[in-house]
Amino acid sequence: MNAIIIEDEKLSAEHLSNLLKRIDASINVIATFDSVKKSVSEFQKGIKADVVFVDVHLADGLSFEIFSKLQIDTPIIFTTAFDEYAIKAFKLNSVDYLLKPIGAEDLRVAIDKLKKFTQSHTSIVQDIANAYQNLNKQYKNRFMVKMGDSIVSVKTEDVLHFIAEDGITLLVTTNAKRYPVDYTLDQLAELVSPEQFFRINRKVFISINAVQKVSSYFNSRLKINSDLLDDESAIVSRERVNEFKAWLDK
C-alpha cells in the first residue's frame, strides 16, 4: 500500500512515517509534501497513492484548498492539532481523523478502517470540496433597500424576516420597517446564512433572533410567536417541522 503524507512539520511527518512502518510493513510512504502549492503541483503531475495523510493546517493555507482545486480519487486520513475544527467540519468526509500527537493505537484503528473502506470513497473528495466552499462562503451582511428617493443600508442582523406578498419580497426589520428587495425567497436561500435564517413555509424566511416561542399547532405543524408576523404566516409547514427543530437546536 502506497501512502503520501502532506505535513509541513518535518518531525511530525517523520513520526507518522515511522509509526506506519511499525504498524504495517506493507505501507510504503512514497512522498511527503509540506505545502498546498507543492501538493497541488505534484498531484497535477500524476502522482498517485492508496491513501493520503493530510495535516489540516499547512504553512501556506488550509489543506482543504488542495481538494477544492483537484479531483483526487484517493481515501484521506486527516491529521490535526485542532480537535473541534476537524470534528465539526470534516469528520464525515474522510476515512478518519487523527489528533496530534498521533499515537500508535489511533493510527492502527485508522488503518483498519481504511482497509475496510470500499469504493464508496469516490464521493469523498467532492464532499470535502463542497465543505470547504461552504466554510468559506460569504453571506450577505447587509441589504441596500429603497426608502422614498433614497437608498439605505440594512444590516442582515437587523432583519426579523423576509416575506413574499403579492408577487414581491419584503424585508422586515426589528424596528418594524418593511422594504421591498429584488430577490425571491429561493435566491435569498443562497444569500443569507442557513445558521441565521430558516424558511418556515412557502412565504416566510425567519431569523433565529425573531423566534420568541414555538408551540404545537393543528395537523402536526408548529406555530411561531414572533413580532410582526401574523398567525397564518407564522406557521411552520408540516414537511419542514423536523428540519426546523434541528435548526433551532444547533
Image (cartoon, grey):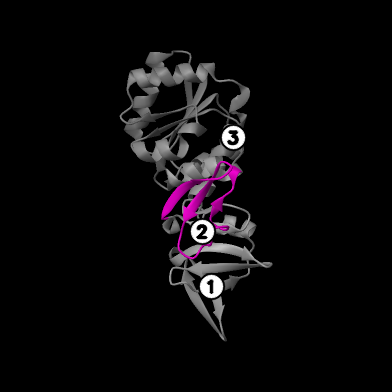
Q: Is residue 6 visible?
A: yes
Q: Secondary structure at mark 3?
A: loop
Residue indicated by mark 2: 139
Residue at x-position 51% and y-position 33%: 93
| Residue where numbered disc 1 is placed | 178
Mark 2: secondary structure: loop
* Comparing labels 1 and 2, the label whose residue is closer to the camera: 1
Q: Nearer the viewer, residue 29 or 208?
A: 208
In-image side of 77 versus 164 (left or right) = left
Residue 76 placement (x, y as % from top left): 50, 30
Residue 184 location (% of width, % of height): 64, 62
* Location of residue 189 (image quadrant): bottom right
**Secondary structure beneath label 1:** strand
224 part of magenta stretch: yes
Residue 91 in percent (x, y) is at: 45, 33
Q: Which residues are magenta?
A: 212-238
Does label 2 or label 3 sit earlier along the sequence? 3
Q: CA distance from mark 1 to mark 2?
A: 21 Å
**Crowding at label 2, few (<14), some or many (≥20) Cα neighbours within 10 Å?**
few
Among all residues in the image, which is located at the extreme bottom? Answer: 149
For label 3, the residue is 72
Total numbered labels placed on residues in the image: 3
Question: Disc 1 or 3, which lies upstream in sequence?
Answer: 3
Q: Looking at numbered disc 1 in the image, what kind of residue is underneath it? A: Arg
Which residue, as the protein is rendered here, is positioned at the far left? 101
Q: Residue furthest right?
A: 167
User: Eyeballing the image, is 209 above or below 3?
Assistant: below
